[in-house]
């Protein structure tokens, strides 16, 4: 089953209950990776695990809220208990409640920081000791094109969290490359997932649905993640930016 550099790799994925995380889990498993999946919607995680297993793949699922450090620790511990090592983590969980700053959606600002930045950092903290012990590993962090060029009004706090993801990942790369730990930033443009629905205003959701008519399938991002993981150990993919051809930013 699958390509040699993916087969039997142990890959932890957060936010694997839908969209990019789910597609990545399915594609990795189809290529022979053993995936360990976390998200809050356990019914969705169970369904993905069941489907992968029915197709002959290996998948484990955990109820994981990335804003809870213990949950993320348990997800990673679950992978190590089962498989004895971790080859890669895809820190993918994210939310995008778009709104102008003047709307003062302070609770949504907090949530974006908690999920998109702190949740991702908990993932890094959970895998790092194991990867250092192994002297190998791969940390893949999902950022966004809005972390490269801010979209405003609307995407200011979201863009700031994704810009932070890019900065954190490049800093991690500089710190960890000498320990044989690879770091990759994946920066998608508009991808057809449930993400735009995380906005709290109907008018914004309506505008996003219109904009997302050009969106590309989640599988296009999954393929980039697989590409980064399947490179030989001495080849590090630093950043991949994938957007719809029609998208201008
Ligand atoms: P989805 O909404 O389909 O997926 C988001 C995932 O994040 C879900 O599986 C959700 O699972 C999970 N998540 C949200 N909150 C939490 C939490 N507190 N704890 C654990 N998991 C959580 O959207 P996408 O697949 O598009 O999003 C995946 C990543 O891609 C995100 O980081 C997003 O910012 C990024 N991205 C997406 C783009 C797009 O256009 N779609 C563009 C650029 C970047 P659950 O609710 O079950 O916990």
Image (cartoon, helix red, strand yellow):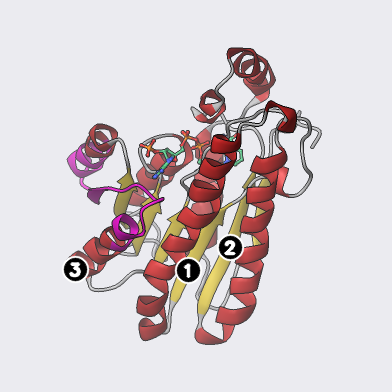
How far apart marks 1 and 2 lie (CA) works out to: 8 Å
Name the N-terminal-most of marks 1 and 2.
Answer: 1
Q: Position of residue 50 (x, y in %)?
A: 19, 38
Alpha carbon distance from label 1 to label 3? 19 Å
The mark nearer the N terminus, 2 or 3, is: 3
**Quadrant of the rendering where the N terminus is positioned:** bottom left
Residue bearing the label numbered 2: 184
Q: Is residue 32 above or below residue 193?
A: below
Where does the magenta region start and end?
Answer: 48-73
Residue 138 disc label: 1
Determine the secondary structure under disc 2. Answer: strand
Mark 1: which secondary structure? strand
Vertical placement of 148 versus 82: above or below?
Answer: above
Nearest the viewer among 96 and 169 is 96
List x then y, in percent, for residue 240: 65, 54
Residue 245 got which mark? none
> Is mark 1 in CB contact (under 8 Å) with mark 2?
yes
């Amino acid at each position: 089953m699958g390509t040699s550099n993916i087969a039997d790799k142990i890959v932890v994925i957060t936010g694997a209950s839908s969209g990019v995380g789910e597609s990545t889990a399915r594609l990795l498993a189809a290529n022979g990776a053993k995936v360990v999946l976390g998200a809050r919607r356990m019914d969705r995680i169970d369904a993905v695990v069941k489907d992968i297993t029915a197709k002959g793949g290996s998948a484990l699922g955990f109820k994981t809220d990335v804003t809870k450090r213990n949950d993320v620790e348990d997800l990673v511990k679950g992978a190590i208990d089962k498989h004895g090592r971790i080859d890669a983590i895809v820190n993918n969980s994210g939310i995008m409640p778009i709104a102008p700053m003047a709307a003062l959606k302070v609770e949504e600002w907090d949530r974006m920081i908690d999920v998109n930045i702190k949740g991702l950092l908990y993932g890094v903290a959970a895998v790092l000791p194991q990867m250092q012990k192994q002297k190998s590993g791969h940390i893949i962090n999902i950022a966004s094109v809005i972390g490269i060029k801010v979209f405003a009004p609307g995407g200011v706090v979201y863009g700031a969290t994704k810009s932070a993801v890019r900065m954190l990942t490049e800093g991690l790369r500089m710190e960890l490359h000498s320990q044989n730990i690879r770091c990759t930033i994946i920066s998608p443009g508009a991808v057809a997932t449930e993400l735009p629905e995380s906005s709290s205003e109907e008018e914004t959701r309506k505008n996003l649905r219109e904009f997302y008519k050009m969106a590309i399938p989640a599988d296009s991002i999954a393929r980039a993640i697989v590409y980064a993981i399947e490179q030989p150990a001495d080849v590090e993919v630093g950043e991949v930016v994938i957007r719809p051809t029609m998208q201008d930013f």
